[in-house]
Image (spheres, rainbow, N blue to C red):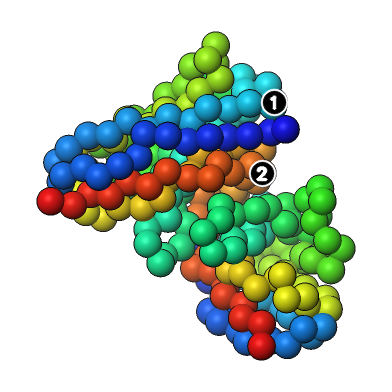
């Protein structure tokens, strides 16, 4: 079964840092680009970042550029999102998502709350 | 950035009714438009990819059409389990963007 499982969310103060992880299973992780997509409480979906299969290409939304870093470890079938200088507006459920041009597989999400 | 505008924002419908949701792109995106269904407290699920291709396992009552800037998701013979929020999404160019969502309520 194709599965993505996120972890690492939690409560953090403004200006703090958090590292999200996504464990992939059931498919050849190293063959796929991956994304992080977030959803603020009661709001719609917002693309955050993408990374190509070999990490050669990395892209960020303007809202997180310079603060967030996406990475992956194909040997561990894992995707990461290092989030620094967190703001209240970064509060959201963060989804790990497989990219096949369309986003065909989503994780269950991990919640990040930025509050003092 | 390509802006996707969905209409309507909300629709209250009865079972067995036919539903049409539209998604308009701010510039041409070819067929790089995908539709997702999200139920409360669940992650989104892919319904339709590349405007009109049904994703594996999706009921046949869901269909999509369109190209360029105007796209449609159609749900034939609505069922109670279709109560959800529906999003369109473009992968034509970065940054990837999503429509604001259309919430379907079943009467």
Q: In which quarter of the image is residue A101?
A: top right
Image point 63% across, 34% down: which residue?
A3
First-in-chain label (2 vs 1)? 1
Q: Mark 1 lies on which chain?
A: A
**Residue A104: mark in rendering:** 2
Q: Residue A100 appears at what percent x and percent y?
A: 66, 38
Q: Residue B101 appears at what percent x and percent y?
A: 53, 69
Tag 2 secondary structure: strand
Total count of labels: 2
Q: Quadrant of residue B12?
A: bottom right
Q: Quadrant of residue A64?
A: top left
Q: How crowded is mark 1: few (under 14 residues within 10 Å), some or many (20 or more)?
A: few
Foreground pick, A55 / B82: B82
Left or right: where A48 falls relative to B86: left
Image point 25% across, 45% down: which residue?
A11
Please identify the residue farthest to the top as the structure is shown: A75
**Residue B29: mark in rendering:** none
Residue on which the image places disc 1: A27
Q: Mark 2 lies on which chain?
A: A
Left or right: where B74 falls relative to A103: right
Q: Residues within 10 Å of mark 2 (few under 14, many from 20)?
A: some
CA separation in Å, label 2 and label 1 = 12 Å
Please identify the residue farthest to the right as the structure is shown: B60
């Amino acid at each position: 079964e194709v599965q993505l499982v996120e972890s690492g969310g939690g409560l953090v103060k403004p200006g703090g840092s958090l590292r999200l992880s996504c464990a992939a299973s059931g498919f050849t992780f190293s063959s796929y680009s991956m994304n992080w997509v977030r959803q603020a409480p009661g709001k719609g979906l917002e693309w955050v970042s993408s990374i190509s299969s070999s990490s050669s290409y990395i892209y960020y939304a303007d809202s997180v550029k310079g603060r967030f870093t996406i990475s992956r470890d194909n040997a561990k079938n894992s995707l990461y999102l290092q989030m620094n200088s967190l703001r209240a507006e970064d509060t959201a459920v963060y989804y790990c998502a497989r990219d096949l041009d369309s986003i065909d597989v989503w994780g269950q999400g991990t919640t990040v709350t930025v509050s003092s | 950035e390509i802006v996707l505008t969905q209409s309507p924002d909300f629709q209250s419908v009865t079972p067995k009714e036919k539903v049409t949701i539209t998604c308009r792109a701010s510039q041409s995106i070819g067929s790089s438009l995908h539709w997702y269904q999200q139920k409360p407290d669940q992650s989104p699920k892919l319904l339709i990819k590349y405007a009109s291709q049904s994703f594996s396992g999706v009921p046949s009552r869901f269909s999509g059409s369109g190209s360029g800037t105007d796209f449609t998701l159609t749900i034939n013979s609505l069922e109670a389990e279709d109560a959800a929020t529906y999003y369109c999404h473009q992968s034509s160019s970065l940054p990837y963007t999503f429509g604001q969502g259309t919430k379907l309520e079943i009467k």
